[in-house]
Image (cartoon, grey):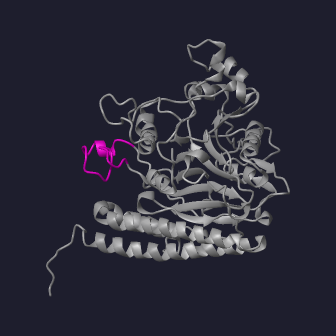
């Protein structure tokens, strides 16, 4: 199970933006190289066929332009992962989740079933292939270029899930400039969605997260909740609600985590500690460490969302999504605790981070330059997010042309090399890593501010060219600073090799 997600409502961010962010991580024992590309309407498929599930879907003929951070290799399909459209709708898809056996039994996954009975369709033993449903590979490509708001995005995704089903359990972050929504798939065809309150942030590791759901609202006004049309009957017919509360008001406060989710010892190693640490950072004055602390790394009742103590910044998100339990006994690079405690829990900033995408929609800028995707490739503790405008027709080669070849001509592979070289001597390299992060973030903020100012003075037709040039400028600076960081950590770590010997021949 990879990935970590954080969603922040507009009243909880430093500038009134809506922000959704996710670490897209790979499974153990492999690389999934990442890139950043623009998809123009002429590049969008009209007849879509999933690589993984073989489902075929006819798509509308009116897609808009959008920018995504997909996998670089085509072996598992497009896997767009994070995207923002020219209509300023954003999606991050997906957070891998798990539902319990009762929910899976009630609504089984829609898995690909290969053809059986040989290769001859005329044979009496032949059974044709049965395509599976849709999943992480497909969601953004099937939804984002056709919608105009976050609510419409939830509705289109929900309709596709009900029609085609899914073969996996996923969480999807969705936003426009006003609203942030979160969708969780339940079994093969069912789903729920909840709006993140404007003054809250929501934390999601690889575990079903929503803990308070108003079924009356979801099946009625849909002010803050949406779900499959038959959700009430689905819950009742399959005895999924285990609550002892039998009052009529109970349906306004269902706990989907209890109805559909899991709570296992593996969750205590892999999932709950990450939610605990994210909330520890954004609500630091609470008691997190005493024997009487109300929440611990293995608590099952860590809230899905809460109000932060201070408004959340890009730097906060970058730190959280790169974190490894700093200032606790669980930090793999720390000096507190024991060897066992420092490797007890799965960190957020892990070797398997593929990219971090922070999708920011800013209400104070015009629609043409409102959207910024802050991107980092590779293991997050060893890099920094950098801002790139998404309302563009093309993206810089340094991020767009990633392939399977390991080369310093691509940001993804350069950051992979830096992490592998710096990791064995993290503390010795930490100052250079910190300076790199400060430089990239400061440079990025200044570049975005200058570009926004210039955009106010130009006609709408010239803005795409301006945004593309700003992206090239950011990529050029990022390349220069990343190469310099590689040189520095290579020098530092080389002098700390196990076969080092300080006495020279002269």
Residue 149 shows up from this direction: yes
Seen at 56% across and 56% down, the residue is: 357
Residue drawn at 45 percent across, 74 percent down? 481
Q: Find residue 26 and report its horizontal and vertical position in percent.
A: 51, 53
Q: Residue at x 86, y 57 (%)?
A: 61
Residue 81, placed above or below residue 161? below
Residue 85 point in image, percent of width and height: 71, 58
Q: Magenta stretch containing residue 2, yes or no?
A: no
Seen from the viewer's position, the closer of residues 171 and 385 is 385
Residue 337: within the magenta? yes
Tell me if I can see residue 69 in this picture: no
Q: Can you tell which quarter of the image residue 179 is in?
A: top right
Residue occupying image coordinates x 61% and y 69%: 400
Left or right: 394 with respect to 497?
A: right
All told, the count of numbered labels is 0
Quadrant location of the C terminus in the rendered image: bottom left
Magenta segment, which residues?
A: 325-345
Q: Give the quadrant of residue 254.
A: top right
- Return the x and y of residue 480 as percentages of the image width and height: 47, 77
- Residue, far right: 61
Q: Nearer the viewer, residue 310 or 9?
A: 310
Q: Is residue 381 left or right of residue 231?
A: left
Q: Is residue 139 left or right of residue 266?
A: right
């Amino acid at each position: 199970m990879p990935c970590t997600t954080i969603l922040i409502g507009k009243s909880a961010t430093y500038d009134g933006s809506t922000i959704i962010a996710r670490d897209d991580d790979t499974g153990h024992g492999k690389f999934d190289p990442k890139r950043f590309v623009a998809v123009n309407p002429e590049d969008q498929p009209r007849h879509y066929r999933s690589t993984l599930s073989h489902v075929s879907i006819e798509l509308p003929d009116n897609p808009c332009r959008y920018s995504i951070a997909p996998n670089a290799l085509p072996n598992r399909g497009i896997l767009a992962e994070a995207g923002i459209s020219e209509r300023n709708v954003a999606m991050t898809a997906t957070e891998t989740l798990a539902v319990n056996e009762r929910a899976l039994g009630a609504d089984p996954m829609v898995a690909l079933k290969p053809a059986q009975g040989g290769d001859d369709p005329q044979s009496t033993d032949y059974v044709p292939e049965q395509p599976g449903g849709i999943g992480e590979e497909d969601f953004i490509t099937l939804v984002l270029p056709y919608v105009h708001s976050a609510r419409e995005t939830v509705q289109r995704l929900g309709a596709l899930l009900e029609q085609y089903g899914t073969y996996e359990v996923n969480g999807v972050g969705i936003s426009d400039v006003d609203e942030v929504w979160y969708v969780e798939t339940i079994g093969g065809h069912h789903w729920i969605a909840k709006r993140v309150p404007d003054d809250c942030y929501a934390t999601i590791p690889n575990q079903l997260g929503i803990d308070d759901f108003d079924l009356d609202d979801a099946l009625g006004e849909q002010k803050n909740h949406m779900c499959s049309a038959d959700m009430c009957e689905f819950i009742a017919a399959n005895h999924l609600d285990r609550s002892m509360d039998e009052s009529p008001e109970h349906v306004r406060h269902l706990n989907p985590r209890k109805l559909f989710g899991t709570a296992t010892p593996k969750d205590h190693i892999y999932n709950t500690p990450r939610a605990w640490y994210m909330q520890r950072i954004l609500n630091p004055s609470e008691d997190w460490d005493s024997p009487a602390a109300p929440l611990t790394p293995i608590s099952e009742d860590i809230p899905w969302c809460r109000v932060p103590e201070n408004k959340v910044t890009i730097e906060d998100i970058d730190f959280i999504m790169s974190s490894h339990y700093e200032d606790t006994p669980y930090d793999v690079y720390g000096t507190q605790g024991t060897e066992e405690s420092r490797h007890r829990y799965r960190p957020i900033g892990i070797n398997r981070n593929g990219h971090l995408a922070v999708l920011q929609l800013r209400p104070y800028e015009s629609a043409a330059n409102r959207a910024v995707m802050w991107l980092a490739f590779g293991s997050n503790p060893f890099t920094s997010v950098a801002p790139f405008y998404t309302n563009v027709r093309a993206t810089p080669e340094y991020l767009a042309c990633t392939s399977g070849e390991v080369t310093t001509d691509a940001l993804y592979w350069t950051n992979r090399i830096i992490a592998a070289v710096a990791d064995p001597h993290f503390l010795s390299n930490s100052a250079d890593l910190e300076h790199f992060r400060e430089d990239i973030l400061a440079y990025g903020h200044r570049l975005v501010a200058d570009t926004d100012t210039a955009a106010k003075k130009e006609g709408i037709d010239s803005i795409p060219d301006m945004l593309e040039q700003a992206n090239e400028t950011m990529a050029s600076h990022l390349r220069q600073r990343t190469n310099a960081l590689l040189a520095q950590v290579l020098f530092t770590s080389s002098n700390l090799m196990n076969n080092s010997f300080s006495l020279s021949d002269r």
